[in-house]
Amino acid sequence: MALAVLLVMIGSTACASTANGTETSGARPENRDVSRRTGHSLHLGSSAPTGSTPVPEAPLEATLGEPLALGAGFGRRLLVTVQAVVDPAQGGDPLSLAQVGYRFVGVEVVVRPTGGVVRTDVSADTEVVGSDGRTYLHDDDPLVGCTAVPMGTAVIGVGSTVSGCVTFEVPDAVSLAAVQFTLGHGQAQGRWRVS
């Protein structure tokens, strides 16, 4: 009788569930917890997962005024030129004021498709890199003497061009090192040296 009770207890323990409803039989809870915290599935063994994202290429480099040809698959090819950098730049209306300790910087960009229709957000795809190594994202303020590029995603056909200024706010103590334009969620990137 005692042996029968012991066997029933062992069987029910093997099929037990944790408090959160996850079965513990045949699994290592510590591995499952790591997967949940990081948002990535664990791959045990040496085989690489299939369908992985392609590794982005090293950025192409140029000086201001030189065009770079960027391609990111599906026929998305652009000729991008950073024409000039206006540093410091002046806000285009009385409400356009940089934060205390910061200044406006304008980046003049020209974007032209060379292989089919391209959808791109020129402002969001353009960044500046400071002497502090940090990357600064665009600002929506208008600038004096430079028409802003269209906001949001633009659909650009072959033979069409999008050009204008992208505005940034950069700390007064930081100089500009480079301007970057990224296409295809990081698959292709151009970099223009500023200093």
Image (cartoon, rainbow, N blue to C red):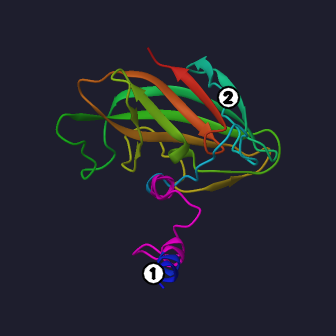
User: What residue is at 47 percent from the left and 77 percent from the top?
Assistant: 6
- Seen in the picture, residue 172 relative to 160 is either above or below; the reply is above
- The label on residue 181 is none
The residue labelled by disc 2 is 57
Q: Which residue is mark 1?
A: 2
| Pointer 1 or 2: first along the chain | 1
User: Which residue is the extreme one toward the front?
Assistant: 1
- Residue, x 51% and y 46% (percent of image)? 123
Which range is magenta? 10-36
Give the quarter of the image for residue 154.
Answer: bottom right
The kind of residue on which mark 1 rests is: Ala
Q: Secondary structure at mark 2?
A: loop
Using the image as rendered, state which of residue 105 and residue 129 is in the foreground.
Answer: 129
29 left or right, relative to 143? right
Q: Front-most of 87 and 25?
A: 25
Does the segment drawn in magenta span residue 12?
yes
Residue 97 screen position, x and y as percent: 24, 45
What's the distance in space between the residues labelled 1 and 2, CA to CA?
68 Å
Residue 47 image position (x, y, % from top left)? 73, 40
- Residue 14 on image: x %, y %: 53, 71
Q: Is residue 49 above or below residue 1?
A: above
Please name which of the two marks, 1 or 2, marks the residue nearer to the observer: 1
Local crowd at mark 1 within 10 Å, few (<14), some, or many (≥20)? few
Q: Position of residue 29 (x, y in %)?
A: 47, 59
Q: Is residue 51 above or below residue 176?
A: below
